[in-house]
Image: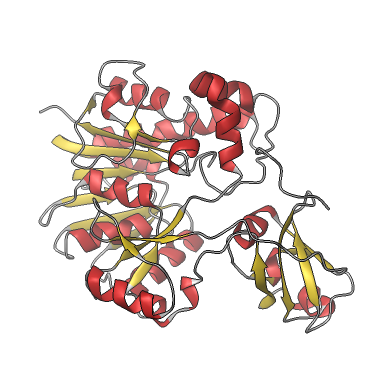
């Protein structure tokens, strides 16, 4: 068992990729990736409640809550820590995703448990990542046999996370659909898209529905909105998000959106959002990544297929926004350069919260980058317009 690494652990080849972006600042960036952002963000669902009303409600729960000065529906709650974590004799080893969630206060559910030898209900246990990092501690709600037999339910109630962020998913406000946990750059992406009532808007990678529901919210449900994703499980997760938030007029389609132009030739959009699967190297906190350099190059190629379709289905004069929660050139500016080959042009953003994109070509400075060592997370947003 060990303490957190001073910097994120990456496979060979990835640091070299990131050095092309950050140069001498690379070690600072790798160190920042291990820590959570300074604040946890939620989006106020203004279809149901005002930002002022929700701010007041959350403050009664004992949290410090701040309104974002740029995005009016964004609320920030400071993350506390690092805090001391007890080292109990009993250990629960969890998967990577669960470990990184526990770091900021999430509880452990049975599917995330890898090993829990000797655990009984009521036991105090320390929680470890697959590589032995101590990320939190808590009280067992299930025994070892229950966890490994049933594989469902709350396994460990975390009482001592390394960092503390609010567990908003357990609140009445969450269940009532007053809020949605969503990062600041994710909200900024939809504001950059700037959807308007009366338009046709397509989200090519809609699951689990955060940005899609935000689009519905900003248009007050008065736009024709399509959400595409390729699996029934992802569509089901999106349906649950939309239902909780009261978004009733979105058209969800289970389909491989790389072929929307061929499979749904009637869909012509005023605005298209491309938020494809990526290497997630900007998501914090991150203990380590297992993505290889070859996998990242493959992902970049995969992402381009969605950009190509977006350029085909957007109307002349329409807007395409591309976003990824990563920091590699291959998935960010280089893919944005590919969008130019598809006939799209860099466009000014109505909202700017990040740093300018790296100027690999004219117009790339109009894009936005969020840097882990400056903003607490890594993210990329590019807005384009189709000439016409």
Q: Position of residue 104 (x, y in %)?
A: 58, 60
Give the residue at x 35% y 27%. Answer: 357
Is residue 380 shown left or right of residue 25? left
Q: How many marks?
A: 0
Give the image quarter of residue 387: top left
x then y, percent, for residue 168: 46, 72
Quarter in which the C terminus is drawn = top left
Q: Nearer the viewer, residue 6 or 207?
A: 6
Query: In the depicted view, which residue is nearer to us: 375 or 276?
Result: 375
Above or below for 320 versus 200: above
Query: Which image quadrant is residue 29 in?
Result: top right
Q: How is the image coloured?
A: secondary structure
Return the residue nearer the eye: 248 or 110.
110
57 versus 191 height, above or below = below
Going 34% across and 68% down the picture, which residue do you hit?
Answer: 242
On the rendered structure, is 58 left or right of 133? left
Measured from the top left, where is residue 134 in percent x and y?
A: 75, 56
Q: Is residue 289 above or below residue 23?
A: below
Residue occupying image coordinates x 42% and y 79%: 61
At x 37% / y 75%, what residue is drawn? Answer: 58
| Residue closer to the observer: 69 or 111 | 69
Q: Residue furthest top?
A: 361
- Horizontal relation, residue 52 to residue 6: left or right: left
């Amino acid at each position: 068992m060990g303490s957190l690494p001073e910097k994120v652990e990456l496979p060979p080849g990835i640091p070299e990729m990131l050095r092309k972006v950050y140069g001498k600042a690379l070690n600072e960036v790798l160190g920042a990736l291990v820590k959570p952002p300074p604040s946890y963000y939620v989006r106020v669902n203004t279809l149901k409640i005002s930002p002022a009303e929700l701010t007041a409600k959350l403050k009664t729960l004992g949290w410090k809550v701040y309104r974002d000065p740029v995005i009016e529906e964004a609320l920030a709650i400071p993350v506390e820590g690092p805090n001391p974590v007890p080292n109990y004799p009993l250990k629960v080893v969890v998967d990577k995703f669960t470990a990184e969630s526990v770091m900021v206060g999430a509880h452990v559910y049975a599917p995330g448990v890898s090993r829990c030898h000797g655990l009984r209900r009521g036991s105090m246990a320390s929680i470890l990542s697959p590589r032995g990092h101590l990320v939190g501690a808590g009280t067992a709600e299930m025994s070892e046999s229950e966890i490994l037999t049933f594989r469902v339910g709350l396994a460990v109630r975390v009482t001592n996370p390394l960092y503390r962020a609010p567990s908003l998913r357990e609140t009445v406000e969450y269940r009532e659909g007053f809020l949605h946990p969503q990062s600041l750059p994710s909200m900024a992406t939809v504001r950059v898209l700037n959807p308007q009532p009366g338009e046709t808007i397509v989200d090519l990678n809609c699951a689990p529905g955060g940005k899609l529901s935000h689009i519905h919210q900003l248009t007050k449900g008065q736009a024709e909105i399509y959400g595409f994703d390729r699996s029934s499980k992802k569509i089901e997760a999106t349906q649950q998000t939309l239902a909780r938030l009261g978004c009733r007029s979105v058209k969800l389609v289970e389909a491989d959106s790389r072929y929307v132009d061929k499979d749904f030739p009637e869909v012509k959009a005023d605005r298209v959002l491309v938020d494809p699967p990526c290497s997630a190297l900007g998501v914090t906190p991150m203990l380590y990544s297992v993505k290889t350099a070859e996998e990242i190059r493959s992902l970049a190629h995969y992402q381009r297929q969605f950009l190509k379709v977006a350029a085909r289905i957007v109307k002349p004069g329409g807007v395409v926004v591309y976003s990824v929660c990563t920091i590699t050139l291959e998935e960010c500016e280089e893919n944005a350069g590919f969008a130019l080959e598809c006939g799209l042009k860099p466009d000014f953003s109505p909202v700017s919260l990040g740093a300018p994109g790296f100027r690999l070509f004219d117009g790339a400075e109009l894009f936005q980058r969020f840097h882990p060592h400056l903003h607490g997370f890594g993210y990329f947003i590019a807005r384009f317009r189709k000439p016409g």
